[in-house]
């Protein structure tokens, strides 16, 4: 490890081979080589780096596991990467309070392993084994959001370092509070542009007594989406409700060696407190999906069966990457009102056909979050960008959002004013008030 400049008093790596690992993200989007990588293990390290950055006017990019998909972690020039993955202590698990307090580098699977000893679970599941700090910074959600919500609903308190060096504890480890402005929630989803999260207290939930997973194939996309919307309307005990299209199922088969019918499908989790309730839920789902023409229904009840089923869904992005070697990938993640889910999926499919793109549509259909994956090369990048723009514009036109969970980062800043109007000026004012020199993850979310 070498240092080529007078940096802060913690380990910094400036080797070119290391810095080159931070130039691109999972989608292939590229930035510049950062100035260096500083490795923090706790609050004191973050304070030291923040003081040095303030004195030297060096911008910082806080980073966890690096699973972001919208360019949040890409450098534009002379930024220093502040790697928090080694700040990874589980500080406390309080079963009586249903909370855990962790450093930002703790991953969700590691927390779940520890919480499971108390019959509890941390429920936010974006698929990737992300760090809790990164998940809070991007307001991550995922497959379980339909029942448990995303990070904003599951972080009850946090500690953060602001650009001026102040350390603040925001929120309290209680079920609800009506005290003051909700500054904690302001930082969640801010992508490290307002402060650096150094500790979190998160909600834990009981592991349900009975779990069952179901995979259902349908003759058409519309049939699958309509069945999902009907399930939502009946308040079934569904904790995961995922949609994948035919191309996605084919990619899963290729990567995982499965033999699923290559047709649109739903992946569903039921969580109940008794076997009787689980059986009743399964019967109701069976009735609904058959009414919508389901062609195959598979129920997974054992832990091994359930793990395999959800591993298939979680590996979808890697399956799509394996299916299109030599390509990079755009991933749109719009979210729309429930009444417009079928329209959003249909619009994406139609636009892909019209533009000759080999797209795949999937998503957390239970909360209206529609993902479209677009493989592209340099030759057809303009067409891929045209497609992505049209999908986002359609979502905004029907009352949806440009990003349901991946965030704005570098890629979607141009949509902010269309979605939020004059509120963007308030956002810019907050950014300037909390980070007047623009040191924290500059150029992300807003151009200030």
Image (tube, rainbow, N blue to C red):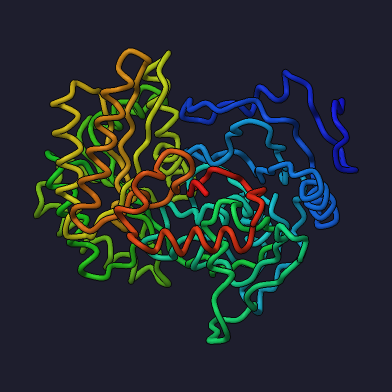
| Horizontal relation, residue 213 to residue 64: left or right | left
| Horizontal relation, residue 51 to residue 219: left or right | right
State the residue in front, 224 or 84.
84
Question: Which residue does the image show at 70% across and 38% down from the upper left?
Answer: 81
Question: Which residue does the image show at 20% across and 34% down from the upper left?
Answer: 263
| Horizontal relation, residue 250 to residue 30: left or right | left
State the residue in front, 378 or 277.
378
State the residue in front, 299 or 42.
42
Tell me, yes or no, if residue 319 can be seen here.
Answer: yes
When the figure is inspected, residue 22 is found, relative to residue 264, above or below; the finding is: above
Location of residue 71 in the rendering, given as x and y in whole percent from the top left corner: 51, 37
Residue 147: name its quadrant. bottom left
Location of residue 314 in the rendering, given as x and y in whole percent from the top left corner: 44, 40
Q: Residue furthest bottom?
A: 178
When the figure is inspected, residue 306 is found, relative to residue 78, above or below; the finding is: below
Question: Which residue does the image show at 50% across and 65% down from the upper left?
Answer: 152
When the figure is inspected, residue 316 is found, relative to residue 214, above or below; the finding is: above
Q: How many labels does the image show?
A: 0
Location of residue 30 in the rendering, given as x and y in whole percent from the top left corner: 52, 26
Name the quarter where the N terminus is drawn: top right
| Horizontal relation, residue 230 to residue 98: left or right | left
Location of residue 67 in the rendering, given as x and y in whole percent from the top left corner: 55, 39
Tell me, yes or no, if residue 299 can be seen here.
Answer: no
């Amino acid at each position: 490890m070498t240092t080529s400049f007078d940096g802060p008093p913690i380990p910094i790596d400036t080797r070119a081979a290391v810095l080159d690992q931070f130039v691109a993200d999972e989608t292939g989007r590229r930035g510049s080589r950062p100035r260096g990588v500083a490795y923090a293990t706790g609050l004191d390290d973050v304070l030291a780096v923040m003081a040095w950055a303030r004195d030297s006017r060096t911008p910082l990019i806080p980073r966890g596991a690096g699973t972001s998909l919208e360019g949040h972690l890409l450098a534009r020039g002379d930024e220093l990467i502040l790697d928090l993955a080694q700040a990874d202590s589980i500080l406390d698990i309080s079963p009586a309070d249903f909370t855990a307090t962790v450093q930002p580098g703790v991953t969700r699977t590691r927390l779940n392993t520890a919480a499971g000893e108390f019959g509890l679970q941390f429920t936010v599941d974006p698929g990737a084994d992300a760090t809790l700090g990164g998940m809070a910074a991007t307001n991550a959600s995922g497959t379980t959001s339909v029942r448990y919500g995303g990070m904003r609903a599951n972080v009850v308190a946090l500690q953060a370092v602001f650009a001026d060096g102040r350390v603040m504890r925001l929120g309290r480890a209680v079920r609800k509070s009506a005290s003051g402005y909700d500054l904690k929630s302001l930082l969640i989803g801010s992508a490290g542009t307002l402060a650096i999260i150094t500790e979190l207290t998160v909600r834990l939930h009981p592991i349900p007594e009975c779990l069952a997973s179901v995979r259902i194939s349908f003759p058409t996309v519309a049939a699958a989406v309509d069945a999902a919307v009907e399930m939502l309307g009946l308040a079934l005990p569904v904790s995961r409700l995922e949609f994948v299209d035919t191309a996605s199922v084919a990619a899963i088969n290729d990567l995982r060696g499965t033999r699923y019918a290559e047709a649109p499908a739903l992946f569903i989790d039921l969580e109940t407190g008794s076997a009787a309730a689980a059986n009743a839920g399964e019967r109701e789902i069976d009735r609904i999906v058959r009414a919508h023409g389901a062609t195959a229904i598979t129920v997974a009840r054992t832990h091994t069966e359930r793990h395999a089923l959800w591993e298939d869904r979680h590996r979808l992005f890697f399956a799509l990457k394996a299916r299109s070697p030599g390509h990079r990938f755009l991933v749109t993640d719009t979210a729309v009102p429930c009444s417009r889910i079928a329209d959003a999926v249909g619009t994406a499919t139609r636009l892909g056909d019209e533009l000759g793109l080999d797209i795949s549509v999937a998503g957390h259909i239970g909360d209206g979050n529609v993902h479209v994956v677009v493989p592209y090369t340099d030759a057809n990048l303009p067409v891929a960008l045209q497609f992505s723009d049209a999908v986002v514009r359609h979502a905004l036109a029907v009352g949806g959002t440009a990003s349901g969970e991946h965030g704005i980062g570098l890629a979607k800043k141009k949509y902010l004013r269309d979605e939020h109007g004059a509120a963007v000026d308030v956002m810019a004012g907050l950014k300037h008030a909390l980070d007047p020199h623009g040191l924290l993850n500059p150029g992300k979310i807003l151009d200030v």
